[in-house]
Amino acid sequence: MKSITQFNQEKDTKSLISSFTKLIGLGDLSKKVNFKRHSLVSLLMVITWMIKARFARKSLYRCQRAKNFTAKTGRNVLNDGRINWQKLVCLAAVKLISVLKPVIDRRRRLALIVDDTLMARSCSKKTELLAKVYDHDKHEFLTGYRGLTVGWSDGNT
């Protein structure tokens, strides 16, 4: 008689996130994107915590508390104007391309598609992470979010 193996989804998600952050070298990228804090909280810890919260389908208020910092610290890191988030995304994309390139057939063209779509929320006032965002199409500031989406394509898939 065989027993049914059970998978612990939380452990699988944690190992997946930690292997991804090691793959792109997120710990090394923090100095390159101007992340400077006087506390012991690292950018790797904050981003890993936020990714875990999103995979658990929780908001920053409802997610599991981090051991080393509060949710307010996470929001402060997100709102820190000194951190170059665009450079972080570009450096992570370069690292992903360098990892994926040996696996893909050389005859195919690789493309990493980065989209930062504006999601306007004109009626919202007290929503988590709501900010004034510049819309390049209308040339004005709107209240809303930037939805960062990263996709990869080899021309066929």
Image (cartoon, rainbow, N blue to C red):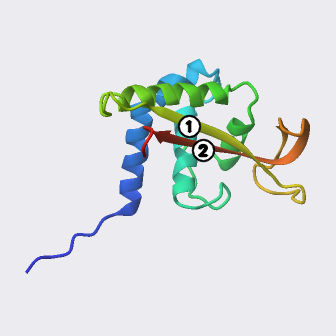
Q: Are marks 1 and 2 in contact (CB under 8 Å)?
A: yes
Where is 48 relative to 6, above or below? above
- Measuring from the top left, give residue 49's x and y in whole percent: 54, 46
Q: At label 1, which amino acid type do we have?
A: Ile
Q: Residue at x 37, y 48 (%)?
A: 15
In the image, residue 42 lies at what x, y percent?
56, 32
Quick check: 114 left or right of 153? right
Residue nearest the viewer, comparing 118 with 131: 118
Residue designated by label 1:
113
Q: Quick check: 40 left or right of 124?
A: left
> Visible in this render: residue 135?
yes
- Disc 2 residue crowd, few under 14, some 14–19, many 20+, Cα 10 Å: few
Image spot of residue 100 (x, y percent): 37, 32
Q: Residues within 10 Å of mark 1 (few under 14, many from 20)?
A: few
- Quarter of the image with the N terminus is bottom left
Q: Residue at x 90, y 35 (%)?
A: 139
Q: Quadrant of residue 37?
A: top right
The quarter holding residue 24 reads: top left
Between disc 1 and disc 2, the foreground one is: 1
Does 77 sit left or right of 24 as displayed?
right
Mark 1–mark 2 distance (CA, rounded to whole Å): 8 Å
Residue 42: in sight, yes or no?
no
The residue at which mark 2 appears reads as 149
Image point (60%, 61%), residue name? 58
Which of the two discs, 1 and 2, labels the residue nearer the N terminus? Answer: 1
The percent position of residue 114, horizontal first and vertical second, equals 60, 37
Q: Amino acid at mark 2?
A: Thr
